Amino acid sequence: MTGLIVVLVFLLGLTALVLGRTLYFAPPRGRAEAEFSGCGEAAPDALDRLSRAITFPTICAQDYTGTDFTPFDRFIAFLEEAYPLFHRTCEGERVNGYALVYRWKGSDPSLAPMMLTAHYDVVPVEAGTEAEWTHPGFSGARAEGRIWGRGTLDIKSQLTAHLEAAEALIREGFVPKRDFYFVYGQDEETGGRNGAYKAADYFAEKGIRFAGVLDEGGFVVSGVLKGIKTPLALIGVAEKGFCNYELTLEGEGGHSSMPPVHSALGYAAKLIAAIETHPLRSRLSLPAGLMLRNIAGEMGFMMRMAVANLWLFRPLLLWILGRNPVTNAMIRSTFAATMARASNAANVLPQRARAVINVRLLPGDSVAAVAEYFKKLGKGLPLSIRPLEAEEASPVSPAEGPLYDRITGLIGEIYPGALATPYLVMGGTDARKYYKVCDYVYRFTPVLVTNEEKNTVHGTNESISIVNYSRMIYFYRRLIGGFDGEAFPAMI
């Protein structure tokens, strides 16, 4: 009887502790409730400039040496014509031929500079889908309250918004306190090795370190996470790494009428099945943990209870997150079998079968460690593994500091009611290249998009609303004009 009482008292105490922690759990909200007075619609000539920027098919070939740089040259010439004050005021340099570096000199050389960056290469319109576009993919058409074409969301719009903001500020006589650098890569879509990597080396060689770097990244979104109706402004503080691993399995060749127990392709299938059914252990990386804590107040009671009591519910929370592909990618390195080849005839046994596994690496996992894991899963199989192009996961930037606070403040101003939160970028950006010259690297694109709009990135009907583009220009005017406490200039 005494033992039962002890157990009941323990359970009651545990319940009280869990409920108390849940009820008094106060995650940082990063949200302003004030109404936004609005920035107005961008001037027609600003919209025309973005439309023209979209008409240049700046497509970088996978084999960089095979790129047709004629559209790149024409785009750069267009920028010089479209933004004359910017180009007269800022020192410009081309790194490795096509990476664009501009320096807007500040009044106080003792302050570390800031960097705004984007890329001006775009992906092609997929062959055979041209007729599915409401307006052609490189038309830059202005219709239905939108500007249409490749680069409107990824991400020439960010580049031109930077320059629109700077051009207007220069016209008003504004001079920043610190240097502002504007850096634009030409091959982000194919890895950034000839653009952002070279620009980062350029700064490192000159001994230039930045107070902060802001690149493309998370949007302001709603409906991305089930059960959360509040718009989330996703500020990327890190990004996953990636690697394509080529798996080669050896087998007996010959005629298929006398097959061995397993052909090379059978071995490959066996290994792929093992990889798909044995993912790496899930865990809360720092960015995912920060995000969950930040958005917990918008979740249902049970999820909020789990986040508030990770010491008890961490395994349950990871299990729940792992059931959805979107949230599963937040908590583990993911494996996807994407390519395979073996025999070139139906009745010939392949001597080799090859498969490619695309891996997205969680911070803390490494290219080498995953290769060893695959070897372990393939123990006893005639297997060789070759990592192809690879990038380790980026470092994690602090979810605090002058630039991060400036971003969240502007989100609260422009998107009242939205919840600004750090998050882990699942794809890749040029931002990761700049950690060698900055510890405060962030990824955020200040537009509000629906899931449908978000899915047009690299897809059909990529476009940006005029409202969103106007907000982008406003955001960068406020960011540049007010970073060091100068009076905010009026918006046109």
Image (cartoon, rainbow, N blue to C red):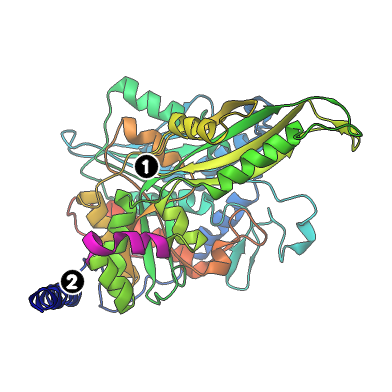
Q: Main secondary structure of the magenta part?
A: helix
Q: In which quadrant of the rendered image does the N terminus lie?
A: bottom left
Q: CA distance from mark 1 to mark 2?
A: 27 Å
Q: Position of residue 277 (x, y in %)?
A: 55, 49
Magenta stretch holds residue 313: yes
Q: Which mark is residue 363?
A: 1
Query: Relative to the observer, which residue lies in front, 106 or 282?
Result: 282
Residue 464 left/right relative to 21: right
* Amino acid, disc 2: Phe
Q: Is residue 326 above or below residue 118?
A: below
Residue drawn at point x = 81 percent, y = 29 percent: 350
Q: Is residue 259 above or below residue 33?
A: above
Residue 90 left/right relative to 184: left
Q: Which residue in the protein does label 2 denote? A: 25
Residue furthest to the left: 2
Characterize the local packing of mark 1: few (<14), some (14-19) or many (20 or more) Cα atoms within 10 angstroms.
Answer: many
* Amino acid, disc 1: Pro
Q: Position of residue 269 (x, y in %)?
A: 69, 41
Q: Is residue 37 above or below residue 67?
A: below
Residue furthest to the front: 1
